[in-house]
Image (tube, grey):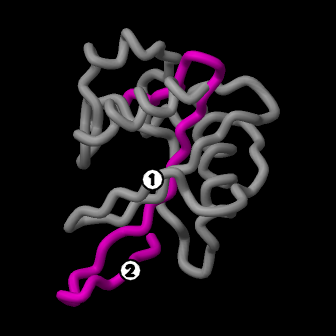
Amino acid sequence: MSTSASAQGVTRARIVTALLRDGNKVLLCHRSPRRRRYPDVWDLPGGHVEPGELPGAALVRELREELGIEVAVPVGLPMREVRTDAFDMQIWLIESWTGTPVNAALDEHDDIAWFRDDELGELRLAHDSYLAMFTEALAVG
């Protein structure tokens, strides 16, 4: 697991995730209730940046591992960054991929699904900022 150090000297995980948008829907992964962190919530696909790995390359690897799809290494800055005491997360908007997303990480997720904007408010999401970000991303599309 790759980490970064904050000004206080606390080490935080470096995480990359993708907001996969297909028209008026976003793809989310349901984290298994057995997960130690953030169990039983809907989350973005992605994961930890490995030591020596660039964030874009980590995102490509994570989407291949978790969803069985191929994406281009993202160009430019992420659409959003989320920082907590435990992690620094970069989120990229991904609208083009090769393959059909499947739940290829059964040890991490017990389901994946596409959701429209009007369905998102009913979900238990992994982070408080997700709903506004999803709504914004779908409004632009």
Residue type marked 2? Ser
Secondary element at tag 2: strand
Is 82 displayed left or right of 124 in the figure? right
Question: In the rendered structure, does residue 27 fall within the stretch colored magenta?
Answer: yes
- Locate residue 92, reporting x and y percent: 56, 49
Disc assigned to residue 118: none
Is 5 displayed left or right of 8 in the figure? right
Q: What range of the chain is rendered magenta?
A: 1-30
Which residue is more in the foreground, 86 or 40? Answer: 86
Q: Residue at x 78, y 50 (%)?
A: 72
Disc assigned to residue 80: 1
Secondary element at tag 1: strand
| Residue 13 against residue 47 in the figure, above or below | below
- Locate residue 25, reporting x and y percent: 55, 18
Q: Which residue lies under the disc numbered 2?
A: 4
Q: Would you say the magenta stretch is mainly helix, strand or loop?
A: strand
10 Å neighbourhood of mark 1: few (<14), some, or many (≥20)?
Answer: few
- Locate residue 60, reporting x and y percent: 68, 53
Is 50 displayed left or right of 64 in the figure? left
